[in-house]
Structures are given as C-alpha cells and as structure tokens.
Amino acid sequence: MTETKDSLAGLTPEEIEELEFQKKAKDARKEKMKLRRPGGGVALTPTSLLDIMTILLVFMLKNYATNPMNINPSGDLRLVKSTDVSESHKHLVPLAITSKHILVDDKPVVQVKDGKVSATAKREGGDGYFITPLFDALQATAEHQKKLAEYNSSVKFEGELMIVADKDVPFRLLSEVLYTAGQAEFGKFEFAVIRL
Amino acid sequence: MGRTDKYKKREEEKEVDLIPFMNLIAILIPALMYSTEFVKIASLAVSSPRIGPSQPAQVDKPDEKPPLNLTIAISSIGLYIASANNVLPGSEGQQQEQAAGPTIPKVTAKSYSIQEPSGKVKEMMRVWEFNGKTYNLGIKPVTSEGISQRVAGWKAQYGSVQIKDVLDHNYPALHEKLKVIKKAFEKERQVIISADPNVVFESVVRVMDATRNYQDEESGETKYLFPQVVLSAGVV
C-alpha cells in the first residue's frame, strides 16, 4: 500500500480515484473469469483469432467467384490452358467431355471409353455422329430453357453451350458431340479453358 | 469532466461478446471457400458451320474479293493451310509441292515433365523454338531465364525434371504465316478449323490460340487475326 501511495504522489485526488476504480474493475473481472472457469485454465483471447478470420474473410470476398460457371477440373477432366482470352461472364449449360463420361449439366449421360462412345449409343452405329442419349438430354435442356424463356422475358434461348473438354479428347468425339448438339438446336459453343 | 467519467465507468464494466460475430465468420468462411474459384476459367467462342444460304452481305458487293474461306486442317503429320477461293500469299507456285506434304510440318518441341508423388508423370510445359525465339503454349514468348526459373521451382518441389524432345505442330510458324495472310486479306476474320479424327482437343485449342490475335510490331497493339472460328468435322 505504501508503494502505491508513493507512486501516486503528485496526482490529483480525482486521478487517484480513477486509478483505484480501474484497479477494482480489473479485480472484479479477474474474479468473474475465475468463476467462469472453475478449472482455472488460461484465459482465451479471441482478438488474434478474430484478426485472422477477418483477413481471411476479406481475402475470400476478393476471390469470390464472379463467374457464374462452376467448373471443377479433376483427373478425368484436365482443362487446356490458353493465352490471351477473355473471361466468360455468361451462364451457359455445361457439357463436359471427360475421359470417362459425357455430362450435361453435371449429370452423366453417356460413357466414354478410349475416347469413343460405344456404337450402341449411336443412332447409325460405330461410324455415326449422332449420340442418342446425349441428344435426348440436350433436347430436354433446350425444352426447359425455352419454357423458362416463355415465362421470363429476361431469359432468352440462344442455343449456346459451354463445352468443357478434357485435353486429350479426340477431335472425332468432339465433332460427334458438336453435331449432336447442333441437332438439338445448340449451334454456338464456348470452349472452357484455363486462363493464364 | 464528470460526465466523461461516468461514461468511462460504464465502458469499463461492459465486456464485448464476440461469440456471435465469430459464429458468423465461421459460417461465412466455408461458404466463401466453396464458391471461390482457384482456377480462372475462360471461354473460346466457336460455331459450327451453318447450313443454309450464304450471308447476303457477301452477295451484295460483287467488286470485293470473294470470301477467303481460310481453312486450317490439323493432321497427324502437320498443319495444312488452304483457301477455297484465293491463292494465299507465299504459296504461289508451290502448289505442286504442297500437294504432297503439309503446309507446316511438325517440329520437335521440348517437353518438361515431372513425376508426381503418386508416380504419375505430368507434363508441366512444352517449349517451341522458332526463328531464334522460344515460345510456351504454342505462341507465348518466353525467355530462357523464365524457363530456368520455372525448372528450378519444379526441381525444388518434385525432385527432378525430365526434358524430352517431342514431335508437335509448329504453332509459332502457323502464327507467322497467318500474319502474312492477314496483311493480304485485312477484312477477313473467319477461319475454318478441321482436324483428323485422332487429333486431341489440346491441339485444336493451340491452333485457335495461334489464329486469334497478334501483337503489331510497330505499335505494340494487340490486333485481331482470325478470331471467328468455325469448327468443321470434315476430314481432309
């Protein structure tokens, strides 16, 4: 007590009162902490954690996908890198050609083996271009989009598809897919690539 | 003075409850992580050939040159460049020779690959040399320092980098040739790309990259080459 008295020398009574109040408040807080943790653990300071979280949040918001397309490259679907291309901002139906499947809107439609669709899935057999299950799926998509366009004037059916193809897809399979899409009223295509 | 004192005292007693805020952040972060794009996806516009009458704009102007119909065919031995209606610059008098082989035969490119921890070999980069310059991704110029820097990075990460010679299409040569063609046919913007059945998608994209833009040497501007791509399934 004498020590405190010494250090308090030269202070106005108001200031002493203020300091004493602060000390009391601190003690009270310590008591409260002790009450909260009967085990007497280390007091958790969330401030630094909060800082990390806030920084992470800002970073994530900055990287937030402005692109409406969500394409996840994987082992079967290795996208091609390309230079000097603009980012796409359209939302199109994705048609993925992986090394194992052809997918329309993320739903597998036909199996692919060694870069080929089996002859039974094609209307004209092995040499044909028309992939029947793919046509059915695309036609259903086209119908759906047209119906949407009927009720919502901001939606327009333009017959565009986003082709997400693996880099080793042979041109033959690609042209079969494009031909089939053409038959289902999709005539414009965008090839998805990784922008460098 | 008295009033501020009172205010201070009240502040002292209050403890900010951060838990709801932390809850909010803990939920927001996974949600944002889910929708974050770690790879930037871009798209290349392509159309398939239209069946029907030709566009009226081409019929109305009889004094203009007939449409170029520039066609690039990708085969397993090289690239063929042809035009249905015009003789392309640089190919006059060579018709006989060209009938035998591709316009631009394949060349050897350097392939840099690494072995992933799973044992899979993955190609990281392919480099072309043309006219004393080196190119990455077909037509992107790179410096030798840039290459060695990347190789050092991969060596640090994967242990070793294998360098192999591979036979690939000569995209830089295609790019140069198209620049010459563009000078003769400035208004043309369309190119028809076709390929052999077993040509991979990557080659098609590389050709599309080579046909899209070019850097004007005098002004340094990026100018269009033949950005309108029509994909044709026709086999040459």
Image (spheres, grey):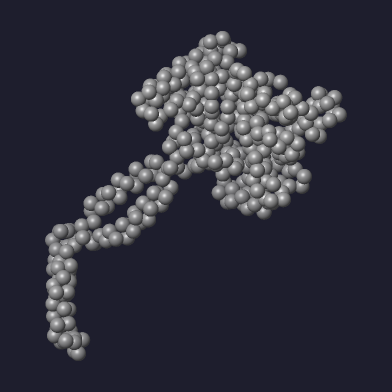
* Residue that lies at the very extreme toward the top in this rendered image: A124
The residue nearer to you, when weighing B127 against B86, is B86
Q: Is residue B133 left or right of residue B5?
A: right
Is any atom of residue B148 visible in this view? no
Q: How many marks?
A: 0
Q: Is residue A113 above or below residue B122?
A: above
The residue nearer to you, when weighing B77 against B63, is B63
Position of the C terminus of chain B by quadrant = top right
Q: Is residue A36 left or right of residue B129?
A: left
Q: Position of residue B120 (x, y in %)?
A: 56, 36
**Residue drawn 38% across the image and 41% down it:** B34
**Residue drawn 53% across the image and 34% down it:** A192
Position of the N terminus of chain B by quadrant = bottom left
**Residue drawn 73% across the image and 35% down it:** B185
Q: Is residue B163 above or below residue B205?
A: below
The residue nearer to you, when weighing B203 against B224, is B224
Q: Is residue B165 above or below residue B92?
A: below
Q: Position of residue B139 (x, y in %)?
A: 67, 42
Q: Is residue B122 above or below residue A17?
A: above
**Residue drawn 25% across the image and 60% down it:** A44
Q: Quadrant of residue B2?
A: bottom left
Q: Is residue B95 left or right of residue B59?
A: right
* Residue that lies at the very extreme toward the bottom in this rendered image: A10
Q: Position of residue B103 (x, y in %)?
A: 77, 30
The residue nearer to you, when weighing A33 against B19, is B19
Is any atom of residue B19 visible in this view? yes
Q: Position of residue B226 (x, y in %)?
A: 66, 35
